Amino acid sequence: MKETGTNGAAPVIGITMAFDDGTHEESLRPGVAIHQVSAAYAWAVEHAGAAPVLLPLTASEEVARAYVRMVDGIMFSGGGGAVRRRHLDRAVLPDLRALAPRRYRFEAMLLRLALEEDVPVLGICRGHQMIVRVLGGTIYSRIDRHVPEALNHYAGQPPLGRAVVHSIAVEPGTMLHDILGKRTVGVNSLHRQAAKRVPAPVIVSARAPDGVIEAVESTAHRFVVGIQSHPELIASTVPAWRRLFEAFVAAARERRRAAGERVPGRDAEAGELRSGAQERALRSGT
């Protein structure tokens, strides 16, 4: 784990998770609602110097606001492939909302709250598409049906996502270009849908050779970046992607520093409880 910064306090990165309600015969655990997420997301931010925490779904705005107060950055994860596999024979795949309604409502609420507070955001795969969709953009329902001469954007051979399968062209002058330090970089590819139209203040920061949007960023926020591939799976072998997580964690660290090294929710509450107990002890003379 890298140096943690001011007073040794690692910035806290919240990570969203996929959700399966257990109601389908092909559910991961039929009859049981579960959260699940690849460990690679947490490992990537931990190796970059942050403390990862997982954020379960909630319908409560109060709880979502507590998440935003608790963390210094939020990673909107990908995943949910087990749900999507049920629909692969359809000409039009379900959009993000229809595919996982409860997860969509939660992540849309959390993203809006994070943007209001200028919390650093990194969206990966589905998370990248959430940034586009929630801010008013549109998504191709199937790349292979709508993009002429499209590459194969789902290269799912084992080991899953560990191989670079094509390059992307990074736009000069973008934050992503500054971070990666490269005009072209290799990516893995595990998606069947992609951003179609990007809304302001979001801009396209990288494309695949077939023109498919591979990265976006916001020009109106401290750090809002979406990556269509899965850089967490190749960060150990492609140094440019390791720099992405380091930049994300650095933005989270700077937010923590600017907020005066605030203490995340539970610790702050514990501090208030300790102070109250100390005051009562002084009053009682113990």
Image: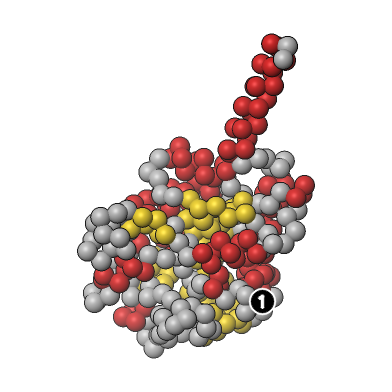
Residue 271's x, y, as percent? 65, 31
- Please rate how many residues cluster around mark 1, counting C-alpha atoms within 10 Å: few if below 14, some from 14 to 19, many from 20: few
Say left or right for 257 vs 35.
Answer: right
Q: Quadrant of residue 267?
A: top right
Looking at the image, the residue that sits furthest to the bottom is 149
Residue visible at 58% across and 38% down? Answer: 265
- Its colouring scheme is secondary structure
Residue visible at 41% across and 72% down? Answer: 194
Question: Can residue 219 be spotted in the picture?
Answer: no
Residue visible at 69% across and 11% down? Answer: 284
Say left or right for 5 vs 75.
Answer: right
Q: Which residue is mark 1?
A: 239
Q: Amino acid at mark 1?
A: Pro
Question: Can residue 13 be spotted in the picture?
Answer: yes
Near-viewer residue (127 or 238): 238
Quadrant of the rendering where the N terminus is positioned: bottom right
Residue 220's x, y, as percent? 59, 55
Q: Quadrant of residue 60?
A: top left
Q: Quadrant of residue 225?
A: bottom right
Quadrant of the rendering where the C terminus is positioned: top right
As drawn, 52 above or below 233: above
Residue 164's x, y, as percent? 54, 84
Say left or right for 9 vs 97.
Answer: right
Residue visible at 55% across and 70% down? Answer: 232
Looking at the image, the residue that sits furthest to the right is 7
Near-viewer residue (196 or 23): 23
Q: Secondary structure at mark 1?
A: helix
